[in-house]
Amino acid sequence: MIGAYGEWAASLTAGGPRPLSLQDCPAGEFATRKLAARARTLACMAAPPKPEGITAKTVRSWTHDGLAGEEISWQLPYGPPTSAWVLKPVGATGRLPAVLALHDHGRFKFWGKEKIAQTGAAVHPLVVQHRAEAYEGLAWANELAHRGYVVLVHDAFAFGSRKVRLADVPPVLHGKLKDDTDESPAGVAAYNDWAADHEHVMAKSLFSAGTTWPGVFANEDRVALDVLCARADVDPARVGCGGLSGGGLRTVFLAGLDDRVRCTVCVGMMTTWRDFLLNISYTHTWMCFLPLLPRELDFPEILGLRAPLPTLVQNTQEDPLFTRPEMEAAMAQLARVYAASGQPGNYRGSWYPGHHQFNRPMQTEAFGWFDRWLK
């Protein structure tokens, strides 16, 4: 990706095991090194103070296809309110297991939660197309709720209700975008194109503020986890999270750093920093990148910070966003981390044929994994 400078750059982290690596950790040192590695990861994320005491209000409720749904909203100290949907089986009582369902990036910022959840209202043609390509046409949050879970899906930082508004940025950044509320296919596509072009501005601005994109979205996902765990219909000791692609990225950070996530499924987002550096950075969002940490922890080890808590990682064999050798290297790293933790059976890495997706067979395995550990 950077021509003749690539191998030199790769050599900067190639001088043996990284200092905080959890792989092949000597017996008796895993817990101590894990604490140090988590602390260093949080330091590199440079997250602003996490908002505390956030409470959600119910906006509306509905029933659809055997599910009871709620639209809820909460206000962070900055930006527009966060909108979320909560789904569970109609008539369910008591405290249920729960999953924070993390929507993808997909170069589709006009909406967030709508890409993986359904209310019963008509579905926009571009969402139908997105689900067909990424999820075999399924709203997977609904599919999981049918199995007896409370499922919360919220809009991530810079998506949907949290997206950047045209009126809030200077005219020099407007480009060809005239209306960020136009829900016609052309209008939605125009916003998604504009938002993609705006990503480098967001990343550089966050760096200039002394924080990072992972630091911000992980904070907001942890607030959503607060909201989910505080619900009277949720058993906070049986909570999981998961998602595809950008949702897998968010899974890496949330599940790696918050032990309230008792079980997790990361889909289509597992490779190495070397892969990003030499092969694939051009295919990925600015949300992925965390300065300095690659010298001390490889990308898979961020998720490995949750070991020995249960973790399933799913990859597809023809995923164009990664190279197969580095995906395999990442999966092997996680296997070594879990072996070092003393619980190798709590990690599973799976391969599926096809492109970048979370299709029906993958969902079946993922939901079974949640059932195994949360029910």
Image (tube, helix red, strand yellow):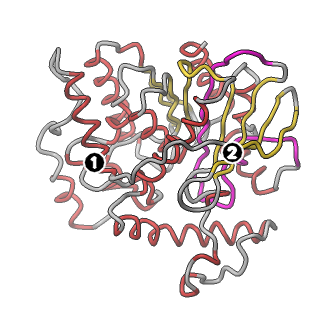
Percent coordinates x, y for residue 157 in the rendering: 55, 55
| Residue 179 visible to an observer of this rendering | yes
The residue that appears at 66% across and 36% down in the rendered structure is 152
Image position of 67 (left or right of 53): right
Of the residues shown, which amino acid type is indicated by label 1?
Ala
Tell me if mark 1 has few (under 14), some (14-19) or many (20+) residues whose alpha carbon lies within 10 angstroms of its own. Answer: some
| Disc with the residue nearer the chain's start (2 vs 1) | 1
Percent coordinates x, y for residue 91 in the rendering: 84, 19
The residue that appears at 70% across and 34% down in the rendered structure is 141
Rendering quarter of residue 369: top right
* Magenta residues, dominant SS class: loop
Percent coordinates x, y for residue 87 in the rendering: 75, 32
Residue behind mark 1: 43
Image quadrant occupied by the N terminus: bottom left
Front-lying residue, 281 or 149: 149
Rendering quarter of residue 86: top right
Front-lying residue, 339 or 163: 163
Q: Residue furthest left?
A: 15
**Is residue 110 magenta-colored?**
yes
Residue behind mark 2: 84
Secondary structure category for the residue under label 1: helix
**Is residue 131 magenta-colored?**
no
| Residue 318 visible to an observer of this rendering | no
Percent coordinates x, y for residue 245 in the rendering: 53, 45
Secondary structure category for the residue under label 2: strand
The residue range painted magenta reads: 92-121
